[in-house]
Image (spheres, coloured by chain):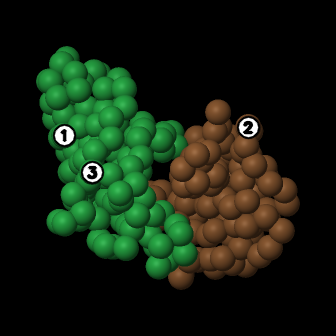
Chain colours: A brown, B green
Amino acid sequence: GAVVSQHPSWVICKSGTSVKIECRSLDFQATTMFWYRQFPKQSLMLMATSNEGSKATYEQGVEKDKFLINHASLTLSTLTVTSAHPEDSSFYICSARRLAGGSGQETQYFGPGTRLLVL
Amino acid sequence: GESVGLHLPTLSVQEGDNSIINCAYSNSASDYFIWYKQESGKGPQFIIDIRSNMDKRQGQRVTVLLNKTVKHLSLQIAATQPGDSAVYFCAENNLPAGNMLTFGGGTRLMVKP
């Protein structure tokens, strides 16, 4: 259990185009999903927190008009990189928070990531 | 919050040896900690977690130790195998930041055959 998928797994696009990345929790419901980006040899950088049915909360320095997040259902969140530029090339990873059973502790499970290359 | 590490420390071990990966966390209010394994080109994979009311938890071949006094977390891998080669991140549940995970910088584990 606790599988998170992302689509696409990698994408190459021209500068100026928009790219949509989907994140799905396959076998559980996630009221909260998170979007991270990761540059080579670096740790994960949280971009935004997405709650189902409400607006996403963005981290400082992340442009909300640049990175559009939609959390339409308890199993799907999307990240759209608008007017992508080469500096947006990165590894984008989503995660979904699942409420653990007996302990009540929420655990985050990560998707496999989407590698974006903007030419 | 997030943590960025520009240079990942590397731990190199011989296959079959035990590995110990260390992590220092910053927030004494954190009450939940997770270790993740990330292989090249993949998302982080949950390994093991521990709550702050425990100081040790064991899984299959892995043990997590928590020392709240010095805010230190470690991951021990027994009989390390080549498939264990990856980057390992610790994460703390940072309550003041709104119940979100804060990641450490990561440690690269290289297993020599």
Q: Secondary structure at mark 1?
A: strand
Q: Secondary structure at mark 2?
A: loop
On whether disc 3 and disc 1 are found on a single subunit, the reply is yes
> Residue A52's x, y, as percent?
79, 64
Q: Is B104 above or below relative to A6?
A: below
Label 3, label 1: how far apart the Cα atoms are:
16 Å
Q: Disc 1: which chain? A: B
Report the quarter where the C terminus of chain B lies.
Answer: top left
Give the camera-side residue of A48 and B94: B94
On the image, numbered disc 2 is attached to which residue?
Answer: A27
Q: What amino acid is at disc 1?
A: Ile
Q: Residues within 10 Å of mark 3 (few under 14, many from 20)?
A: few
Q: Which comes before the other along the chain, label 3 or label 1?
A: 1
Give the camera-side residue of A55 and A98: A98
Label 2, label 1: how far apart the Cα atoms are:
33 Å
Q: Disc 3: which chain? A: B
The residue at the point 67 percent across, 59 percent down is: A33
Q: What amino acid is at disc 2?
A: Asp
Q: Is B32 above or below relative to A113?
A: below
Q: What amino acid is at disc 3?
A: Asp
On the image, numbered disc 1 is attached to which residue?
Answer: B20
Q: Is residue B1 visible?
A: yes
The residue at the point 22 percent across, 44 percent down is: B21
Q: Is A115 above or below relative to A83?
A: above
The residue at the point 77 percent across, 76 percent down is: A55
* Side of A10 where B59 appears, left or right: left
Give the camera-side residue of A105 and A48: A105
On the image, numbered disc 3 is attached to which residue?
Answer: B55
Q: Nearer the viewer, mark 3 or mark 1?
A: 3
Q: Quadrant of residue B18?
A: top left
